[in-house]
């Protein structure tokens, strides 16, 4: 591909945070909707400790008052301690399980590079990993949906494949200019993948 014909070039070097953003945009909810409120790690730890103490307190109360309180199932309150203790020992996960699994699979591929180039006529996906090199060119008609968040662009192809472009990876052209360019070439507007919560 003639470098003079390249309008935008994006060199992507993914981290687990990129997969987390993808999970929030596409797996946790539908694209275009606001992400649901999530508990912080601190709140999760408090919840784990609450389960532990609640189980202990209710169990002690039952042992002391079971003759006066006829609620047999309270004697199983200690079961609350089990998930609480597991959570306290393991700690709140920093990333969801899907994100961790996707990141491990990505690392297994041993990607050396993933470069996407956009010209006036088509775009090119260039990748290199332990299996070899790939260099594929596609018409812009191959792209049928476009989104963005603060750190990325995402596009879906007619083959239902989803690609992540890091805004920090633009080596040629700028993310702001890319929005207008790709909308003109594909006829698709770049949509916000995460709507803001109403205040």
Image (spheres, rainbow, N blue to C red):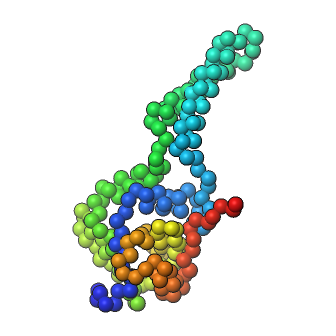
State how many labels appear.
0
Q: Does 147 appear above or below 123?
A: above
Q: Does 56 appear above or below 162?
A: above
Q: Does 88 appear above or below 151?
A: above
The percent coordinates of residue 51 (x first, y second) are: 59, 30
Instruction: Residue at 58% x, 50% y: name it.
Output: 38
Instruction: Residue at 62% x, 26% y: name it.
Output: 54
Q: Quadrant of residue 67?
A: top right
- If the image is split into quadrants, where does the N terminus sit? bottom left
The percent coordinates of residue 7 (x first, y second) are: 38, 86
Instruction: Residue at 43% x, 58% y: name it.
Output: 17
The percent coordinates of residue 175 (x first, y second) are: 46, 77
Instruction: Residue at 57% x, 71% y: name it.
Output: 192
Left of 63 or right of it: where is 161?
left
Q: Does 43 appear above or below 197?
A: above
Whether residue 125 can be seen here: no
- If the image is split into quadrants, where does the C terminus sit? bottom right
Left of 49 or right of it: where is 4?
left
Left of 37 or right of it: where is 112?
left
Whether residue 168 can be seen here: yes
The percent coordinates of residue 131 (x first, y second) are: 24, 64
Which residue of the protein is positioned furthest toward the top in this rendering?
67
């Amino acid at each position: 591909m003639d470098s003079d014909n390249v309008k935008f070039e994006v060199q992507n070097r993914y981290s687990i945070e990129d997969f987390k953003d993808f999970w929030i945009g596409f797996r946790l909810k539908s694209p275009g909707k606001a992400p649901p409120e999530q508990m912080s790690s601190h709140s999760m730890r408090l919840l784990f400790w609450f389960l532990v103490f609640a189980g202990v307190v209710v169990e002690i109360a039952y042992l002391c008052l079971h003759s006066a309180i006829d609620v047999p199932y309270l004697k199983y309150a200690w079961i609350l301690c089990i998930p609480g203790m597991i959570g306290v020992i393991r700690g709140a996960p920093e990333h969801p399980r899907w994100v961790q699994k996707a990141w491990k699979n990505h690392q297994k591929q041993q990607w050396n590079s993933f470069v996407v180039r956009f010209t006036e006529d088509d775009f090119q996906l260039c990748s290199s990993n332990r299996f070899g090199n790939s260099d594929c060119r596609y018409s812009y008609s191959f792209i049928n949906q476009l989104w963005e968040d603060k750190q990325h662009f995402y596009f879906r192809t007619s083959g239902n494949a989803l690609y992540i472009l890091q805004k920090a990876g633009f080596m040629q052209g700028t993310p702001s200019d890319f929005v207008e360019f790709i909308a003109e070439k594909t006829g698709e507007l770049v949509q916000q993948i995460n709507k803001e919560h109403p205040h």
